[in-house]
C-alpha cells in the first residue's frame, strides 16, 4: 500500500474582525484551510464601534461610486471577479444611494457575521490579542482602532513609530422627525443607478446658510480623549484625513467652502421654489426600512448638545431627533512602504501580513481589497504555493504597489484613484487628451482585461 505523508499546514491567525479581517478569513476558508479569526469586541470595546458584529461600518453606509468609469467602481468590479464575500453581500442588501453602493449597515454586518460564524473552517475567538503570535502565519487587520497594547507591540517589533490621523463619523437622524414639507427628494442632476430620487435634500437660502456657518464657527468642540493631542492643530497636532474633514474644519477654511463641499447645491432644484437653493444638506437612507438617514459629509467633532442645536437650524430638521451624533476617532496606520512588499508581507518577517486601514489604505472597499489579497497570499504561503502580485494595470495591483512603493518619508493613507494606476500609453493618451471620461473608461477596460487574463491563466 502507498504511504500517505501528512503535510503540516502552518496555523493561520487573523487579528481583527473588521472588513479586511473578515474578507481575509473567508478567502482562506475558500482555499480549504483552517483559520482563527481574533476579534476583541465585545470583551474590549472601541470608541467608535456600536456593536460586537464583524465588519461593522463605522463612518457611513456608503461604499462609494458603483458607476463606471470611476476608480471606485473599477476596484469593486475587480473584487467581484475575485468573488469577494463582502462585496457580494453589499450587492445583495444595497439601499438607494444615487451612484453609490450604499448598504443597510446593520444588515450588512449581521450577514457577514452569520456567514463567518457558519463556516466550519473559521474559528472565531472573542478576545484581545496584545502580541503577534510567534509561530504560524498572521494577518494583522486590526484597523484604524488598533488597541494601544498591540500598537505599541507593532511599533516595537517594526522599529517604526505608528502614525495617526483623525477620521470622522456623520450624524444619523430619525426619518420620522424630518419635515417633508421642506425637504425634497432628488438625486444630483437626476442621476442614480436605477433612475430614482435617492436623497432627501434640505435647502437653505443665503441668510439661513450664513447663520448656520456663524453658529458652526462659534460651536464648542469635544476635548481630545488623548492627553496633549489636538486633532488638526499645527504644527504638532494629529492631522485630519483630508478626504473626510469635519464640517467645522471646512468652515474655518472660508465661509463659502461648505457650499463648494458637502453643502453644494449644484444639480439640484427645489421643486417648491422652482430654482436651485443657495446651499443644500443631503440625507442618505441608512437601511432597508428607510427609518433613518445620515447627513452626507456632516462628520464633526462638536459636543452633542451643540450638534443638536446647530443641526436643527437646517430647514427641515428643526424638530429632528438623532439616533447618533457625529464623532471623531483616531486612526492608526503603519509606514507601509518602509515595511511591506507588494504581497502585503512584512519584509523582515514574511509570515506576517498587514491588511486594511492599518496598512495605510483609506476606505471600506480598499480595506476589503487588501483583506482579499492578504488572505489569498497567506493561503498560498501556508500551502507552499507561489504568492501572487496582481498586475500593475489593475486597481488592486496599483493599490498594493502604492502601499509597498510610495515615498516612505511622506506616506499618507490613500483611497483608490486613477492617479495610482499607470498612465495610458502615449498614442492612446494623446488621442484621448481632450476626453477625460474616455481616458478613464480606457484605464478601466485595460485593468479588467488584465484581470481577466490573470484569472483565465489560473483556471
Image: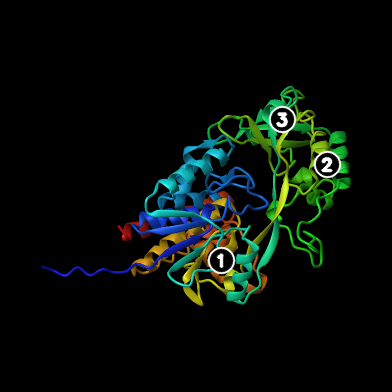
* SS at badge 2: helix
Front residue of 450/82: it is 82
Question: Which residue position is annotated with label 1?
Answer: 402
Contact? badges 2 and 1 (CB < 8 Å): no
Q: Quadrant of residue 181?
A: top right
Front residue of 433/85: it is 85
- Mark 1 Cα shell of 10 Å, populated few (<14), some (14-19), many (≥20): many
Question: Which residue position is annotated with label 3?
Answer: 269
Which badge, 3 or 2, comes first in the chain's sequence? 3
Residue 250 position, x and y percent, is: 78, 50
Residue 408 position, x and y percent, is: 62, 73
The residue at the far left in this view is: 1
Specify how the rendered protein is coloured: rainbow
Contact? badges 3 and 1 (CB < 8 Å): no
Which badge, 3 or 1, comes first in the chain's sequence? 3
Question: Which residue position is annotated with label 2?
Answer: 306
Residue 210 in the figure: left or right of residue 447: right
Quadrant into which the C terminus falls: bottom left
Q: Is residue 157 visible?
A: yes
> How far separated are the C-alphas under marks 3 and 2?
30 Å
Q: Is residue 39 above or below residue 175?
A: below
Residue 451 position, x and y percent, is: 41, 57
Amino acid at each position: 500500500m502507498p504511504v500517505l505523508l501528512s503535510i503540516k499546514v502552518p496555523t493561520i491567525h487573523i487579528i481583527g474582525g473588521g472588513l479586511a479581517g473578515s474578507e481575509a478569513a473567508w478567502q482562506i476558508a475558500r482555499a480549504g484551510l483552517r483559520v482563527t479569526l481574533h476579534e476583541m469586541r465585545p470583551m474590549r470595546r472601541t470608541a467608535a464601534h456600536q456593536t460586537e458584529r464583524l465588519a461593522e461600518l463605522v463612518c457611513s453606509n456608503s461604499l462609494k461610486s458603483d458607476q463606471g468609469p470611476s476608480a471606485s467602481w473599477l476596484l469593486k468590479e475587480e473584487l467581484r471577479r475575485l468573488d469577494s464575500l463582502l462585496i457580494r453581500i453589499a450587492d445583495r442588501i444595497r439601499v438607494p444611494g444615487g451612484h453609490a453602493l450604499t448598504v443597510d449597515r446593520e444588515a450588512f454586518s449581521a450577514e457577514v457575521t452569520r456567514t463567518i460564524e457558519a463556516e466550519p473552517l473559521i474559528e472565531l475567538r472573542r478576545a484581545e490579542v496584545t502580541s503577534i503570535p510567534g509561530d504560524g502565519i498572521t494577518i494583522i487587520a486590526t484597523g484604524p482602532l488598533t488597541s494601544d497594547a498591540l500598537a505599541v507591540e507593532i511599533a516595537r517589533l517594526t522599529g517604526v513609530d505608528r502614525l495617526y490621523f483623525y477620521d470622522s463619523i456623520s450624524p444619523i437622524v430619525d426619518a420620522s422627525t424630518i419635515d417633508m414639507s421642506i425637504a425634497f427628494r432628488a438625486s444630483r442632476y437626476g442621476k442614480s443607478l436605477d433612475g430614482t430620487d435617492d436623497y432627501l435634500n434640505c435647502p437653505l437660502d443665503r441668510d439661513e446658510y450664513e447663520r448656520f456657518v456663524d453658529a458652526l464657527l462659534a460651536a464648542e468642540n469635544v476635548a481630545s480623549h488623548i492627553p496633549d493631542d489636538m486633532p488638526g492643530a499645527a504644527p504638532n497636532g494629529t492631522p485630519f484625513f483630508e478626504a473626510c474633514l469635519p464640517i467645522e474644519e471646512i468652515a474655518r477654511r472660508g465661509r463659502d467652502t461648505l457650499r463648494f463641499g458637502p453643502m453644494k447645491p449644484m444639480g439640484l432644484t427645489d421643486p417648491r421654489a422652482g430654482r436651485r437653493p443657495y446651499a443644500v444638506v443631503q440625507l442618505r437612507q441608512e437601511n432597508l426600512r428607510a427609518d433613518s438617514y445620515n447627513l452626507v459629509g456632516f462628520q464633526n467633532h462638536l459636543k452633542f448638545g451643540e450638534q443638536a442645536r446647530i443641526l436643527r437650524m437646517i430647514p427641515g430638521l428643526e424638530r429632528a431627533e438623532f439616533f447618533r451624533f457625529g464623532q471623531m476617532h483616531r486612526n492608526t496606520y503603519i509606514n507601509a512602504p518602509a515595511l511591506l512588499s507588494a504581497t502585503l508581507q512584512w519584509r523582515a518577517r514574511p509570515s506576517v501580513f498587514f491588511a486594511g486601514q492599518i496598512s495605510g489604505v483609506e476606505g471600506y472597499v480598499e480595506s476589503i481589497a487588501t483583506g482579499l489579497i492578504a488572505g489569498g497570499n497567506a493561503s498560498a504561503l501556508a500551502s507552499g504555493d507561489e504568492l501572487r502580485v496582481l498586475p500593475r494595470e489593475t486597481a488592486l495591483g496599483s493599490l498594493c504597489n502604492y502601499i509597498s512603493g510610495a515615498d516612505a518619508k511622506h506616506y499618507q493613507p490613500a483611497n483608490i484613484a486613477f492617479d495610482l494606476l499607470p498612465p495610458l500609453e502615449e498614442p492612446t493618451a494623446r488621442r484621448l487628451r481632450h476626453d477625460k471620461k474616455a481616458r478613464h473608461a480606457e484605464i478601466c477596460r485595460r485593468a479588467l482585461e488584465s484581470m481577466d487574463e490573470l484569472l483565465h491563466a489560473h483556471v
